[in-house]
Image: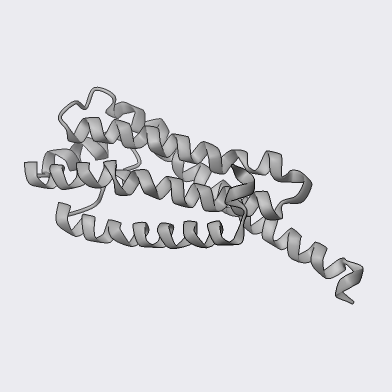
């Protein structure tokens, strides 16, 4: 699977899907009348935001969580994992862990939020752990992508064929 994600065509597809889905959140944010639950770093802020939303806004947010925000982590996580797998060299088996982990954490966070948007907020307290973990893993994965790309460029510049 990682070899497939590391192909140029697949990286391009993941990038386009990531950008399009990322843009779609601005449309959803407008339709929900404010910030999305994904950006709320804790359960108290998420509960307050839920209380502000109308039934229609919750319905729009729920659909976006189930569709857009399921596609999004698969796209950015797949892109990050593919780039790392392709360019991280001997470190790729270790470096690929954070992008795979962020996909899982983001999808679990989506489940918690979908339940809350559907009227069952019994697991909303998990956002206190899930959302900071998601953003932390995303940042770590992005840093590892940049390191992998930089290392690949450095290795390429030092190879005898480049002289």
**Residue 105 placement (x, y as % from top left):** 44, 35
The quarter of the image holding the N terminus is top right
Identify the residue at the far left of this view. 55
Residue drawn where x is 68% and y is 60% of the image: 149
**Residue 98 placement (x, y as % from top left):** 57, 40
Left or right placement of residue 57 versus residue 116 in this view: left
Asked whether residue 33 appears in the rendered view, the answer is no
Viewer-proximal residue among 67 and 112: 67
Identify the residue at the far bottom of this view. 163
Asked whether residue 153 appears in the rendered view, the answer is yes
**Residue 80 placement (x, y as % from top left):** 56, 51
The quarter of the image holding the C terminus is bottom right
Left or right placement of residue 6 versus residue 152 in this view: left
Residue drawn where x is 15% and y is 56% of the image: 31
Q: Is residue 109 above or below residue 158?
A: above
Residue drawn where x is 75% and y is 59% of the image: 151
Left or right placement of residue 54 versus residue 14 in this view: left
Viewer-proximal residue among 4 and 61: 4
**Residue 65 placement (x, y as % from top left):** 27, 43
Residue drawn where x is 74% and y is 44% of the image: 91
Q: In this view, does 87 lie above or below 44?
A: below
């Amino acid at each position: 699977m990682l070899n497939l994600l590391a192909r140029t065509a697949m990286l391009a597809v993941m990038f386009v899907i990531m950008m399009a889905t990322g843009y779609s959140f601005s449309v959803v944010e407008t339709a929900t009348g404010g910030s999305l639950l994904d950006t709320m770093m804790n359960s108290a802020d998420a509960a307050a935001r839920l209380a502000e939303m109308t039934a229609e806004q919750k319905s729009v947010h729920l659909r976006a969580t189930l569709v857009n925000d399921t596609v999004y982590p698969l796209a950015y996580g797949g892109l990050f994992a593919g780039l790392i797998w392709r360019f991280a060299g001997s470190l790729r088996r270790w470096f690929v862990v954070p992008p795979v982990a962020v996909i899982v954490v983001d999808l679990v966070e989506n489940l918690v939020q979908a339940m809350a948007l559907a009227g069952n907020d019994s697991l909303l307290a998990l956002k206190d752990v899930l959302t900071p973990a998601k953003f932390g893993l995303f940042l770590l994965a992005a840093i590892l992508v940049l390191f992998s790309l930089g290392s690949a460029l450095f290795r390429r510049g030092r190879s005898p064929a480049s002289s």
